[in-house]
Image: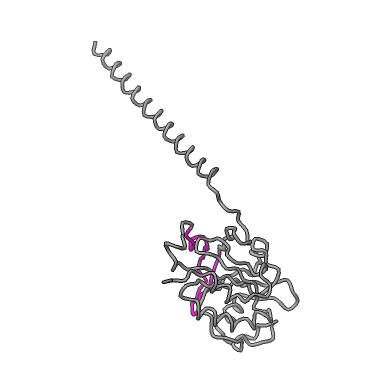
């Protein structure tokens, strides 16, 4: 009799265990279905450099003015996919400049970049993506990029024969992203330097310089920023 009770007890326990396992599978299946539905039916923009697309990620190392080390950076971690211009007009946009410290045009653009950051830095995150293009006399190093950013003495800028401390403009107090390996050229469609893409706070490309030949980037930036207080 005692043995029979024990067998019945074990049977009840096992049945409850089976019920819990089955319920777990049902819940897991439901969650999986919901996630698949979100992925399939959410209207996600394609990733690319064109206006209206989700900007390609910038993931790597950046250098800030006066820092001793390069630190990790991830553009997607800085964006807010739920951003709305009406509810959050003061959210920061992104001004992404692709440049080469050996590029003469980038050398001249250093002063306008100083002026743009001074005018819009409270509302825009500036990022300079430092490339080293496959052009004769273009062979930038991290040391050269830092010297260009900080206007410190190094006889390697502007083709390798110019002291970086003599470049136009002030020291640049925004992030310089290391892309000397040219990993961003294809994803961002970069054909030459300097080249600018303006990105909304949610990561969507708002303005691509290639589509606006001759337009001043400062005017473009001003016209797109939500006018706070109006």
Residue 227 in the image: x percent, y percent?
A: 47, 71
| Quadrant in which residue 186 is drawn | bottom right
Q: Is residue 65 left or right of residue 189?
A: left
Location of residue 207 in the rendering, given as x and y in whole percent from the top left corner: 60, 67
Q: Which residues are magenta?
A: 60-80
Task: Locate the C terminus by quadrant.
Answer: bottom left
- Comparing 156 with 40, the one in front is 40
- Quadrant of the frame with the N terminus: top left
Query: In the image, is residue 34 above or below residue 68?
Result: above
Quarter of image, res 136: bottom right
Choose between 68 and 212: the one closer to the eye: 212
Report the front residue among 176 and 46.
Answer: 46
Please identify the residue farthest to the left as the structure is shown. Answer: 2
Examine the structure image and report whether residue 223 is included in the region drawn in magenta. no
Above or below: residue 148 compared with residue 220: below
The residue located at (65%, 72%) in the rendering is: 195
Q: Position of residue 53 (x, y in %)?
A: 60, 58
Query: Per the image, is 78 magenta?
Result: yes
State the residue at coordinates (54%, 85%): 170
Q: Residue furthest right?
A: 136
What scheme was used to colour the molecule? one colour
In this rendering, is residue 110 above or below 180? Answer: below
1 left or right, relative to 61? left
Q: Is residue 148 left or right of residue 91?
A: right
Instruction: State how many labels appear.
Output: 0
Question: Which residue in the rendered view is the most extreme toward the front?
Answer: 230
Of the pair 10 and 75, the residue shown nearer to us: 75
Q: Residue furthest bottom?
A: 166
Task: Please state the horizontal and vertical placement of residue 210, each as a whole percent of the image.
Answer: 67, 68
């Amino acid at each position: 009799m005692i043995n029979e009770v024990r067998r019945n007890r074990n049977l009840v326990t096992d049945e409850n265990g089976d019920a819990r396992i089955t319920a777990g599978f049902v819940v897991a299946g439901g969650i999986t279905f919901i996630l698949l539905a979100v992925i399939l039916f959410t209207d996600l923009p394609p990733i690319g450099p064109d206006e209206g697309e989700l900007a390609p990620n910038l993931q790597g190392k950046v250098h800030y003015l006066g820092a001793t080390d390069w630190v990790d950076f991830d553009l997607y971690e800085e964006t807010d996919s739920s951003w709305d211009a009406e509810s959050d007009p003061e959210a920061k946009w992104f001004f992404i400049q692709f440049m080469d410290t050996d590029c003469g045009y980038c050398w001249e653009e250093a002063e306008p970049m100083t002026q743009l950051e001074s005018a819009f830095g409270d509302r825009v995150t500036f990022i300079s993506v430092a490339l080293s293009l496959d052009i004769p006399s273009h062979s930038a190093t991290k040391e050269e990029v830092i010297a260009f950013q900080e206007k410190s003495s190094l006889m390697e800028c502007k083709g390798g024969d110019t002291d970086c401390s003599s470049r136009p403009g002030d020291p640049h107090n925004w992030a310089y992203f290391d892309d000397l390996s040219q990993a961003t050229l294809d994803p961002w469609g970069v054909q030459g330097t300097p080249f600018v893409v303006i990105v909304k706070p949610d990561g969507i490309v708002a303005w691509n310089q290639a589509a606006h030949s001759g337009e001043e980037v400062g005017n473009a930036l001003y016209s797109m920023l939500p006018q706070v207080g109006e």
